[in-house]
Amino acid sequence: MKFKNIIYIIILLFITLIGMWAIPALVNKATYNSDQYPFAYYSTILKDIGLIDYKNKKFPMEDLKGNKYNTAHFDSLMPMLNYRQLMTDGKLPDSINGQKITPQLLRSKSVVYKYKPSDINTPVNGLYILLETMPKRVGLEIPNDVFRLKNNIEFIDAQTNTLEVEKSRLFQQALDKEGFQYPAQWLIGNPNSRKPYDEGYFVLDANNQLFHMKMVNNRPYIKNTKIGEKIEASYFSMLEVADKRFYGFLFSKQGELFIIENDGANYKTVKLDIDPIDMQKDEVILMGNMFDWTVSVVTPFAKKIYALDAETLKRIGEHTIDRTPGRWDAVSKWTFPVYLTLEKSETSYIQPYFHYIGIYGFAVNLIIAFLTVIFITASSKRKFFNGIYIFLTGIAGLVALLILPNSKNK
């Protein structure tokens, strides 16, 4: 009998877990709407943030004071965003804010970047390709080998799957000479041959020192950036911009965001003047031009918009749009205090994830448990068990109890 009860509990829990996943998933599919925030961009002309709705053909832009602008005004007030349209219309100004502009200059100063939590929560295979930064022919080429870097560095011929001893030795010696400490925590680059130039990888060693590694004329280039002496690096995102001003974006463990500039023979960090972000939950969308950068940080609760001076990256404007709860929020708040999913937007890994919404749903669970105890005939012991179980597991637990034969009335 005892063994039979154990089997019953195991099956009950299994069905409940399936219900905690399947029932909320169906309700979510019927009620969920993605968060809708207006597109935001800083106007160099207005010196203010503009909110843009491309669906509104008559008045696509609104400033923070509530003034609305038609399409013609929108194009002229956002010349950095709409310069291609202004070129087509023959209305692109020769200068803005006293600085001469050309389409080529605008393209070279354009910066577009997006960070999402899944960037740091995704599987990696541990094999990387290292491009030649100074190829003899025009354009970058994919090499015939790959490398791995953990407790040492090894280059492996991709066709024969054999170790390239000499190349591995050269890079190993260069890393040792520069003081690299194993094992490597991570290395990040942009191994895409369809780009104008390559800057290799940035590597974080065991002592939290950030190194720059690339291959120049088939020789290793390894340098300690010294950035780790002042910043606790958490993540780096390579972005080879057209004007070669900086290498990419560096995130600190405190959620601060920096760019790493090429300062001659040294590496210089410039902090973006925005509030620290939660790398596990927040998205960052950055659009920059020669005058200013617009940084949008989408959190679970709001969209924070920052306007930064392009040269100093100091804040020149900001605006916050609070998130509007949707139907799924209202339903799940009262119906699913705890539910289960097999994936979530913040990660690329598929595994069980429990989500806790709040205590409101337990009030509904209590009502369901009370009604179950009153209207379902059973022994006092069984009623007590059913009531507690439904209070803790909610609708999924009720469905599981109704499915199993032991819960049915006889």
Image (cartoon, rainbow, N blue to C red):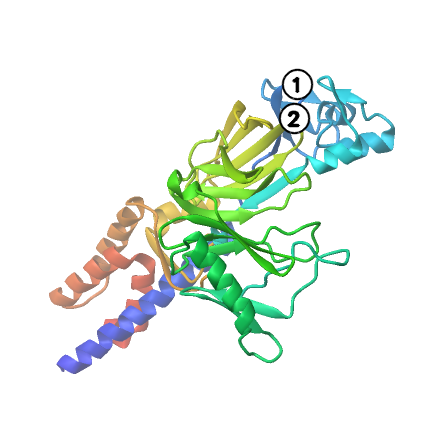
Q: CA distance from mark 2 to mark 1?
A: 13 Å
Q: Closer to the observer: label 2 or label 1?
A: 2
Residue kind at label 1, given as amino acid type: Leu
Q: Is residue 144 visible?
A: yes
Q: Position of residue 210 (x, y in %)?
A: 44, 48
Residue kind at label 2, given as amino acid type: Phe
Q: Nearer the viewer, residue 340 or 32?
A: 340
Q: Position of residue 189 (x, y in %)?
A: 56, 54
Residue at 55% from the left image edge and 64% from the top image edge: 128
Residue 321, above or below 253: above
Q: Is residue 12 left or right of residue 102?
A: left
Q: Total marks drawn?
A: 2
Q: Is residue 236 left or right of residue 15?
A: right
Residue at 73% from the left image edge and 33% from the top image edge: 106
Q: Is residue 244 left or right of residue 232?
A: right
Q: Quadrant of the N terminus?
A: bottom left
Which picture quadrant has residue 92?
top right
Query: Which residue was labeled with disc 2?
Result: 291
Residue 310, above or below 346: above
Q: Nearer the viewer, residue 10 or 175?
A: 175
Q: Quadrant of the C terminus?
A: bottom left
Q: Is residue 409 visible?
A: no
